[in-house]
Every structure is written in structure tokens, then in C-alpha cells.
Amino acid sequence: MKLILDWDGTVTVRDSQWLLLDRFGDRAVWRAAEEGLGRTLSYRELMETEMATITVPLEEAVSYLLDTVEVRQGFAELASRYDPLVLSSGFVETIEPILAREGVEVDVVANRLDPRPDGWRVRWNDDAPCPECGDLCKRRSLPDGGPLVYVGDGYSDRCAALAADRVFARRALAEYLDEQRIPYEPFETFDDVAAALT
Ligand SMILES: [Mg+2]
Ligand SMILES: [Zn+2]
């Protein structure tokens, strides 16, 4: 069994990209952009538009996240027991400092940042569109072999979750799976996930 964890809103209690945009980005731009997601904007366009509103040095942003981001109860224990892969549409540069703070070593597959002073750019880990959903998507980065257990919370988890053998979901991902009548297990903490996997 391979355990796959989304990062923002799944490992982290609050979405760290939202925290960054709220603290350092242009709210008007990202509010408008979020409204268009899945309609007038692809996920790629949304991310690029939002991140371009951040202009602070990366160190300042990371320092803010280190002070602000909380990880979900039971993360370190789950990580040491199941050696999960963190598969995120966020950024290696903002994930790894939090892992280090928590003393957790896991593999991370995520995008990268080019934090330019005229607006951050996204360096996509995989910029070929997914054959299933047509957008940039985490499904193509799932490991081969299985069974796969996927744990997520949001829009960017939809397509990857459909490819997993077992899904733990909360918030927007849970609502989507309800609509699609696809079974999943709800969770609040990683203690819940660990108990269900035992
Ligand atoms: Mg998420
Ligand atoms: Zn997809």
C-alpha cells in the first residue's frame, strides 16, 4: 500500500497558499480568479495569476509560514508508520521548511517557485495536461503500482482521488465525491486515518 497525502488543507490545517496570498498577495485579483476556476480559468491559469500577485522575498514568506502553518494532529506518527508521499500542487520551497520544523522526512512531489520581485512565477513540475481531465493535474504524478490510498481536501485532488483504490476526504473533495456518488472515508485528524488503515 502506498499512502499519498495532499499538502495544503490536508497535512496543513489551513491552506498555506491561501495564507500566503492573504498576507502578501492581491486579494482583489485572487478573489476574481477563484470565481473563474473550472469555468473561465484553468487550474494552471488560476495558480499563475494568483502567485504573480506576490512580490516579497521568499525568505520573508517562508518565515511567515513557519510562524503560522499548523500541521494536522497525528502527522508525524502517520508519516513514520506509512512513509507517505506528499503530492502537492503547492511548492517545494514552502513545504520543505515546514517538514523540517516538524522533524518529518518524506518524499515530496510539488511544483517550484521562481520568486521574482516583480511577481512570483510557477515552475510546474509537470506541465503536460492530464489525459483524463485536460488540466494540469496530480494524477500523472501518482506512483506506479498499488494499492494507492489518497488523502485530500480540495479541487486539485479530484482527478488523482478518482485513480486511487481508497480515499480519505474532507471539505471540497468530500463534497465533490458526494456529488459523484464515489465512496470515501471522512477524516478530521491523521489519527483517524491511521486507525482506519490499521
Ligand atoms: Mg489541499
Ligand atoms: Zn487529471
Image (cartoon, helix red, strand yellow):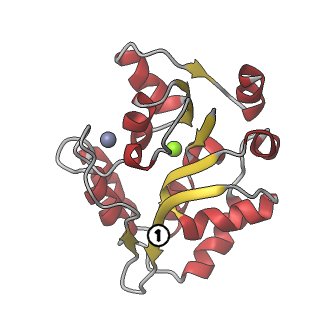
Q: Position of residue 71 (x, y in %)?
A: 72, 48
Is residue 13 visible in this depiction of the protein?
Answer: no
Q: Residue furthest left?
A: 40
Q: Position of residue 113 (x, y in %)?
A: 46, 73
Q: Is residue 197 above or below residue 45?
A: above
Which quadrant is home to the N terminus? top right
Q: Position of residue 69 (x, y in %)?
A: 68, 56
Rendered image quadrant of residue 27: bottom left
Which quadrant is home to the C terminus? top right
Q: Amino acid at mark 1?
A: Arg
- How crowded pointer 1 is (Cα within 10 Å; few <14, some 14-19, many 20+) is rated as some
- From the image, tell me which residue sits under label 1: 112
Rendered image quadrant of residue 30: bottom left
Residue at 57% of width from left, 71% of height from top? 93
Q: Secondary structure at mark 1?
A: strand
Number of marks in the rendered image: 1
Residue at 59% of width from left, 19% of height from top? 185
Q: Is residue 132 above or below residue 105?
A: above
Residue at 47% of width from left, 44% of height from top? 142
Residue at 51% of width from left, 25% of height from top? 165
Rendered image quadrant of residue 175: top left
Q: Residue furthest front?
A: 145
Q: Is residue 190 above or below residue 135?
A: above
- Give ligand 2's quarter of the image: top left
- Residue at mark 1: C-beta within 8 A of ligand 1: no
